Amino acid sequence: MRCPYCEFDDSKVIDSRSSNEGRVVRRRRECLACGRRFTTKEYVEETPLMVVKNDGRRETFDREKILRGVQMACSKRPVSMETINRLVEKVESGLRDNNREEVSSRQVGQQIMAHLREIDEVAYVRFASVYRKFQAKEEFLEELKGLEDKRS
């Protein structure tokens, strides 16, 4: 691995750790020429996951888009960034575990809502209202009634 400081082509690995359910390996390295330390990350190369929108368009799965949506739903709620990141990882790995190259946007939204329902009901209703495009208070009330029924 090339040193980012002196450009020397050789380094030794000091520490390795896997994260993100084994999909990422983080390595601390030390340059054999200048002695400075740096971190590298190795990712599993995966085929791109395509999301099929309701109108038939296809776009590449964007984990950051999910992260932003969940963060907005959880804003000013007692939900940590660690919890949000875990939710996004679960959704992404759940979609990729099906060994399919395409998933519907409906599947993505349903998985997000299923996980959010377990974490924070207010964030769940916020996300559902945007995802399902609520237009009237009755739709909110119906969703709240559904949450209440599941609790019972």
Image (spheres, rainbow, N blue to C red):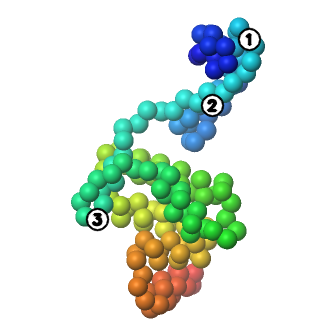
The residue at the far left in this view is 56
Q: Secondary structure at mark 2?
A: strand
Q: Nearer the viewer, residue 105 or 119?
A: 105
Mark 1 = which residue?
34
Across and down, in percent, residue 65 comes to: 47, 56
First reached walking from the N terminus: tag 2 or tag 3: 2
**Residue visible at 42% across and 64% down in the picture:** 109
| Quadrant (top left/top right/bottom left/bottom right) for the C terminus | bottom right
Q: As displayed, is residue 70 above or below residue 128?
A: above
Mark 3 = which residue?
54
Q: Secondary structure at mark 3?
A: loop
Mark 2 = which residue?
26
Q: Residues within 10 Å of mark 1 (few under 14, many from 20)?
A: few
Left or right? Give the position of 38 relative to 110.
right
Residue type, label 2: Arg
Q: Secondary structure at mark 1?
A: loop
Observer-side mark, 2 or 1, equals 1
Q: Are the two marked residues, 2 and 1, in contact with CB atoms closer than 8 angstroms?
A: no
Across and down, in percent, residue 23 comes to: 53, 37
